[in-house]
Amino acid sequence: MRTPIIAGNWKMNKTIEETKAFLNQVKDFSVEGVEAVLCVPYTDLAIAKELVGDYIKIGSQNIHWAESGAFTGEISPLMLKELGVQYAIIGHSERREMFGETDETVNKRVHAAFKHGITPIVCVGEKIEEREAGKTKEVVKEQTEKAIQGLTSEQVKQIVIAYEPIWAIGTGKSSTAEDANEVIGFIRQVIADQYDQQVANEVRIQYGGSVKPENIGAFMRQPEIDGALVGGASLDPTSFKALVEGGKQS
Ligand code: 13P
C-alpha cells in the first residue's frame, strides 16, 4: 500500500511573518494515513521547521549536487539537512523552463538528495505543444528515465514523482483525472521496465496542476494517483488542510 502524499509548493511566496501566520493555523492539524509536506522558500525553512509541529514535513524547492563551492545562488544538501529538511522538489518545470534545469542536472540533484537522506520529489510533464503533437508519453518517459538513472532499487522505491503537465500549472485548467491516471500509470510502467514491477508498485506518483480542494477527490480516487503537488491552493491554511483531508479518498 502506498501512503498518499499531499505536498504544497509555495514557489516564491510568503515572507517569514506570513509563514508564521500560516503555521499557527496548521500546527495542531493531522490526517491519519496521509503524509503532508510543505515546500517553502529557503528563507522560511528554519521558522517552518521550528513551528510546524510533528505531522507536516518540510521540503525545499531545489537542492544542489555539491556540498559546497562556487555555485552562487544555489543551496547545498548539507545546508538543507542541517535545517531538518526531509523533501526537496527537483526539476520543477519552472526551473527547467526559466533557469536552465536539464534532465542531467535533475539526475545529479536526485543522487545528492539521497546521499544526504532527503527524499526527492521529481517533477516531469509535457508542454502544451508536446501534448498536441501526441508526445506526452515520449516526453515523460525520457524525463523519468533520466531522473532515476543510476539509482538503486531501494532508492527508487522511496522517490516521489510529480506528473505536472505544464499547461495545467497555474492556469485553472487541470488535466482530467482519467487522463492524469493514464499518464501516471505509464510512468509506473517506465519504472517497471527499468527496474521491476515490484519496485514500480512502491513508487508514489502525484498529479500536479490546478489541484484545489474541489477537485482533489477526483484525482485521489484514481488507482494510479498517490497524491498531489499543489501550488496556488496550498497558500491558504484552510485550503491546504482541505487538500490533505482530500488525500484520504484514495
Ligand atoms: P498550481 O497548483 O498553482 O497549478 O501549481 C502546480 C505546481 O506547479 C506545483 O508544483
Image (cartoon, grey):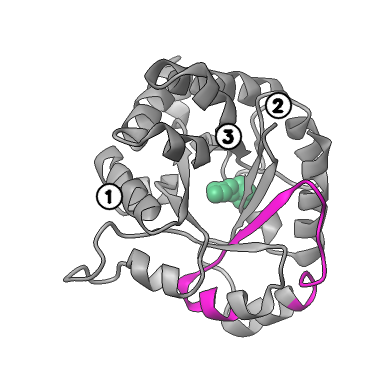
The residue positioned 30% from the left and 67% from the top of the image is 74
Circle nearer the N terminus (1, 3): 1
Is residue 75 something one can see in this rendering?
A: no
Q: Is residue 31 left or right of residue 114?
A: right
The residue indicated by pointer 2 is 177
**Residue 175 sits in which quadrant?**
top right
Residue at x 68%, y 58% (from the top left corner): 234
Q: Quadrant of the N terminus?
A: top right
| Front: mark 1 or 3 | 3
Q: Are marks 3 and 2 in contact (CB under 8 Å)?
A: no
Examine the structure image and report whether residue 29 is included in the region drawn in magenta. yes
Tag on residue 152? none
Q: Position of residue 67 (x, y in %)?
A: 26, 66
- CA gap between label 3 and label 2 equals 13 Å
Give percent across and percent down for residue 103: 30, 38
How would you rate the neighbour count of disc 2 (Cα within 10 Å): few for under 14, some for 14-19, many for 20 or more? Answer: some
Cα gap from disc 1 to disc 3, whole angstroms: 24 Å
The secondary element bearing badge 1 is classed as: loop
SS assignment at label 3: strand
Q: Which residues are magenta?
A: 24-47
Q: Is residue 188 above or below residue 36?
A: above
Image position, residue 138 (x, y; %)? 39, 18
Q: Say what amino acid the circle numbered 2 marks.
A: Ala
Left or right of residue 60, residue 243 in this image: right
Does residue 82 show up?
yes
What residue is shown with label 1? 100
Q: Label 3 amino acid?
A: Ile
Q: Choose between 36 and 232: the one closer to the eye.
A: 36
Question: Which of the pair 28/186 is nearer the observer?
Answer: 28
